[in-house]
Amino acid sequence: MTIMRTSNTFSVLFWVDPKREVNHHVMIYARITVNQKRVLVSLKQKISIDLWDFQKRRAKGSSTKAKQINHYLDSVKARFFHCYQELTSKGKKLQES
């Protein structure tokens, strides 16, 4: 008897597009990946390009602005994960529309 396992994957990645810089500010985006399907979401938040850490994908430093942005990113990620958990716990299939 072979048991087939299904594993769901979920991740959230934050990024900015330096090519769309306006007045030294860029928009923050989230890329949500579920089972290798991706969707891009604008967070409608701007950040100074100098404040963005491209490796850590978060605001850098310990300024009030950096802390506010990182707190916002943490809360957004938590909300996305909560929605994902609710859907999977109800047995809903997540699919592309």
Image (cartoon, rainbow, N blue to C red):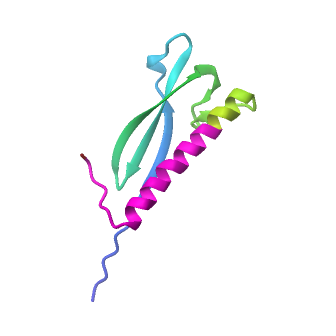
- Residue 94 coordinates in the image, percent (x, y): 31, 56
| View extreme (bottom): residue | 1
Residue 71 horizontal side relative to residue 83, left or right: right
Residue 62 location, quadrant = top right
Please provide percent x and percent y for residue 16. Answer: 49, 28
State the residue at coordinates (70%, 34%).
67
Q: Does the magenta stretch include residue 60?
A: no
The residue under the point 55% across, 17% down is 25
* Dominant secondary structure (helix, strand or loop) of the stretch shown in magenta: helix
Residue that lies at the very extreme toward the top in this rendered image: 23
So how many labels did they put on this image? 0
- Magenta span: 71-96
The correct choice, above or below, for 95 with respect to 67 in the image is below
Q: Above or below — where is 24 with respect to 45?
A: above
Q: Residue 22 location, x and y as percent?
A: 50, 12
Q: Which quarter of the image is occupied by the N terminus? A: bottom left
**Location of residue 74 by image quarter:** top right
Q: Residue at x 44, y 18 (%)?
A: 19
Depth check: give the residue in front, 54 or 51. Answer: 51
Residue 8 visible at all: no
Is 94 on the left or on the right of 79, as rendered? Answer: left
Q: Is residue 43 above or below residue 21?
A: below
* Residue 12 seen in render: yes
Residue 81 sits inside the magenta stretch: yes
Residue 64: x, y in percent?
74, 29
Q: In which quarter of the image is residue 4?
A: bottom left
Which residue is at a point 44% across and 54% down the rendered structure image? 83
